[in-house]
Amino acid sequence: MDGILLILPDFLVILIGAALANLLHWERSFWNTAEKLVFYVLFPPLLFTSVATSNIQPSAAGLFLCAGLGAMLLAVAAAWCMRYLVKDDDWTHASVFQCGFRFNTYIGFAVCARLYGETGLSLMSLLIAFWVPVSNAIAVAVLANAVARKEEAQSHTNLWRSTIKSVLTNPLIIATVLGLIVNVTGLTIPGTAMSLLKNLGSASLAMGLLCIGAGLRMENFLVHKHLIAASCADRLFLVPLIAWGVSAACGLSAVEAGVAILFAMLPTAQSCYVMTASMRGNAAAVANVTTAQTLCAMASIPFWIEMLLK
């Protein structure tokens, strides 16, 4: 019950978002604007203040980063093996592939704040800063290759340029890097500015969770039901188990191991759908997987939290 009660408030906010979008029929354009507000204005200050005020130095977190990144690279391998276990076309597998190792940042930070406080948020911010460019590059490479073969296209130079640009200009990465610079150099941020940033950051998680609920969608669920089920089992149970084993093997502290496992237990990001649609992948299948993982996470995350609390 402790795990369920811990995560329940956050998932209730997600369900409120779904109710607002579907029962009150709020326009999709409103939610698209809200998502941009969270991504560009509200969430970066939370990352910045968490890292800038942390007592954790990047050099001291080296083992944690190696363990976290290593576990997620194994998650990439597990997601790739899915094509050998479940029969489906290569185009669909390449589209769903990213759902095995990309993550929902807002759920992660909401749960991490409750479990591990500022220390946990700082560790997760560092892991996000390193994993986002790696995971995006892997996802784009696989999907671009599959789309090229399906459409018999020859060049994706412009796609790669835009991808590199999006990674370098990602506000989450920029905020984390700036926070690291302030932390390492000992720069002092004026109290008024820090209070402003903390106020913006505190509004990000609730708004982000509402947007998650509003983005839940199902399209022809039964068409890829076996792949969807396998993807949920892989992302929500196998990947956290991998992270647990890697954390134990590396001898991480309780908080470091907890954050690494928490990072691994998160459902996939809703931005997977946006990227897949823009690259002409199987967006409907990805929408189904994203929604299924988010809903199933309501049961899987409390389970893993109970394991961490024991």
Image (cartoon, grey):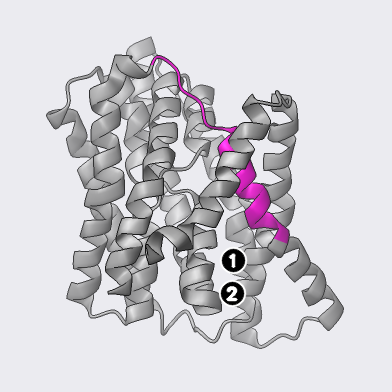
Is residue 104 rendered magenta in the image?
no
Residue 188, x across and y down, in percent: 75, 86
Q: Which residues are magenta?
A: 203-220
Residue 58, x across and y down, in percent: 47, 79
Residue at the location (57% across, 38% down)? 213
Task: Examine the rendered structure and indicate whether residue 19 appears above or below residue 146.
Answer: below
Residue at the location (73% across, 70% down)? 198
Furthest toward the front, the residue is: 1
Check disc 2 and report the residue beneath it. 51
Residue 229, x across and y down, in percent: 26, 31
Secondary structure at numbered mark 1: helix
Q: Amino acid at mark 2?
A: Val
Q: State the quadrant of the N terminus.
A: bottom left
Mark found first going from the N terminus, 2 or 1: 2
Between residue 40 and residue 207, name the one nearer to us: 207
Residue at the location (19% across, 66% down)? 245
Q: Is residue 210 left or right of residue 187?
A: left
Q: Amino acid at mark 1?
A: Thr
Furthest toward the right, the residue is: 192
Q: State the quadrant of the C terminus.
A: bottom left
